[in-house]
Image (cartoon, rainbow, N blue to C red):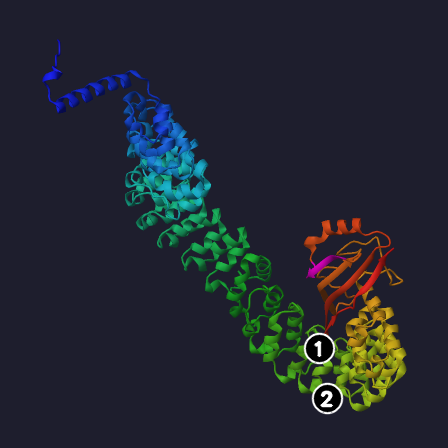
Amino acid sequence: MTIFFNLSQASEMKKLVFLFTLAFFFTSGAICQTEIDPYGVIEQGYSINTLPHKYQKDPSVALFAIENFGLSELNYVSSSLLGNRDFILELWSSYDDEKLLEFIPDSMLNNDDFFENLIYNAPSESMPIEAYKLTSDEFKRISLVPLQLLDFIGLYRFSKEVLPYYSCNAPVLLSLMSNYGEIKEQLLPSKKLDICDSLKQNKEFMRELFAEAGSENFRYASDELKSDREFVLSQVKNNVSYLNEVNPQLLSDREIITRAIESTGSALRYAGEELKKDKILVQRAIESYPLAFQFASPDLRNDKELLKLAIDRDVSAIQYAGPSLLNDPEIMTFELLSEALNDNRADEFILKILPFYSCNESALLLFGSNKPQYLLFCMSCAICESLLNDENFLIKFFEKLPENDQTRDDLLKQLDSKILSNPKLFDVNHLDKYPDNFKYADKSLQHNRDFVLKHVKTNPRIIYLAPRIFQEDKEILSAALVQDGLALQLGTKTLKSDIEIVRLAVDNNSFALKYASEDIKNNFELVKQAVNQDGNTLEHVSNNLRKNKEIISTAFSNRIESVLFIDSKLLNDRTFMLELASKNPYTLFFLKDDFQNDLDFQKLGASIFNLTSEDANNIVSNYSLASGKIGIKPNTSYANSSKLSGKILQYKIDINGKPYLNGKALNTSMDYDSRRELENTLKSGDQVIIHSVIIHAIYDGDKKHQTQLVPSPLTLTVK
């Protein structure tokens, strides 16, 4: 066909249209014949939707488009590509985006092999969970593959987000409940997993469940199965604990309970009330499990024959005896009671049996010696009045009780004065360890000199409780002072002025000097003895001896803080205080400010921090920072007394005129590298200037004392 167009006859507008159309035709033809670069088009910002169809089927082009524009590009790829398993799995492992799930075909998602790949190639825990939620009901009902989610997402997320979907999946439920203990023991009882009604009514499934995971899972059975006599009877030998879940009417079925008892006598607990009255059935249970006696009816628990049968096999069964047997001499023999009380399972038996034996001397003595320590009750309340007035019994009873038993206190409160005037009663009440029991003694006994003296010798606290007359008795007070020097405070003025008495007290405790008369506090020999024991006793000596340098030096030798108690004139004596400081430079913590800024005292003070050698002019070169070379110890106690504590608050140190350290609260974070650097830096002849080291000390004894030591600039030279 020939197309002819006469341009000469056309209007100008038609000519233009014709030429434009012709140009477009040739241009389009050129484009169609040119090969397109799909990656270049996408890089220029064009969607895969603008490319020819053949590129929308190309996995690499599609992946490139998705990489540039996101998963929304999947809307434009071909359906054949969305059905490409390898393409979907590659996207799955690369993109943690639930939007991807919209494009996975159902046929692929509900395939065991494919879903297994989804689990192990998932970019996060949430993706396979969300994928599983989208699977079909049939897949959830029969597939075992999702069990592998346990290994991938862990028990908690599995139970919370996936487990509910398994309620009708019999293979999975059986596997879970038999193999995953944590799910079985923790999740199932808390009802995080339910079993669907169809399985609860399925006898075959429930039998498999019992076989695989135990018949205690009978609680998941339907009400119909729990009422099915033949089904219950068929399972009774496996595990009797499920009887707690069956229809209560079946618990009165003799055949079911008999078969359960044949398995274990403890099954008697589940039996109906009428069956618990059946002696033959109860006897069978006891023969299998002696403590099944406790589940028998009240009448049978008063049956001698059954009780003997039980206690012959397990003596702790005695605690379940009925009231009529608790005081039966034929049953409750002394030997049996003794054996039962030595069995810790029968502890509460004592409480139950006490009222029946309140006048039985032998039994009470036995109970007293075997009373469980943790049972808080007043045993004395169960002792009849006749025995509470029997001195011989009470002495024996107190001897049997443990020393620290609260029953002692309760019982002593109840006794009359006649009993409490018997000194033997207090011999067995251990006044040597529990002197407060002295307060229960009758007044006649408390005023008995021999009784008081005897017990003061074993425990000096007795003298604090004794009548005043015995506190003034020299022999009795002396017996106390040997053990407790501070008992001197109870003595009369005469006794406090008796050098012999005071020496006894000071020998035991130097601070007893506090209670001595003023004359004794001025006795040189006795005071020296006291301050030699503890220098802080200087606080209690006479004003005269606080000026005595020998007494002070003796006190100072073991307690440097004793300088707090010396006479004020000596505190201003530079020579004497320098002498003391030279013996122990910690004295600086207790000096006047004038001495703290004295260079001679400063040199002594520097030695506290190991800043100097013995001549107090040179740094010891083999020390290291924070524990040696310049020796400032960070935030640690630097006193040699347990009553002193202190720490360095600030420091400023120059080496050879250049700043080296300047800061606050010296700490261990600077130790190793800084120490090594300092060791490498310091060399013989170097000058170290300690501009300031502010330290803080606390004396925390009877008195509190705070001080700050701020040394003047001190120049030292490295050896």
Left/right of residue 655 with respect to residue 125 in the rendered view: right
Residue situated in front as seen by the camera: 425 or 657: 657
Quarter of the image holding residue 210? top left
Residue at x-position 57% and y-position 64% = 374
From the viewer's side, name the closer residue of 14 and 183: 14
**Residue underneath mark 1:** 424
Q: Is residue 665 magenta?
A: yes
Could you tell whether 60 is left or right of 291 in the image? left
Residue at 39% from the left image edge and 53% from the top image edge: 276
Name the quarter where the N terminus is drawn: top left
x, y percentage for residue 142? 33, 31
**Mark on residue 711?**
none
Q: Amino acid at mark 2?
A: Arg
Q: Main secondary structure of the magenta part?
A: strand
Q: Please give the residue where the numbered disc 2 appears in the rendered image.
A: 468
The x and y percentages for residue 263 are: 44, 42
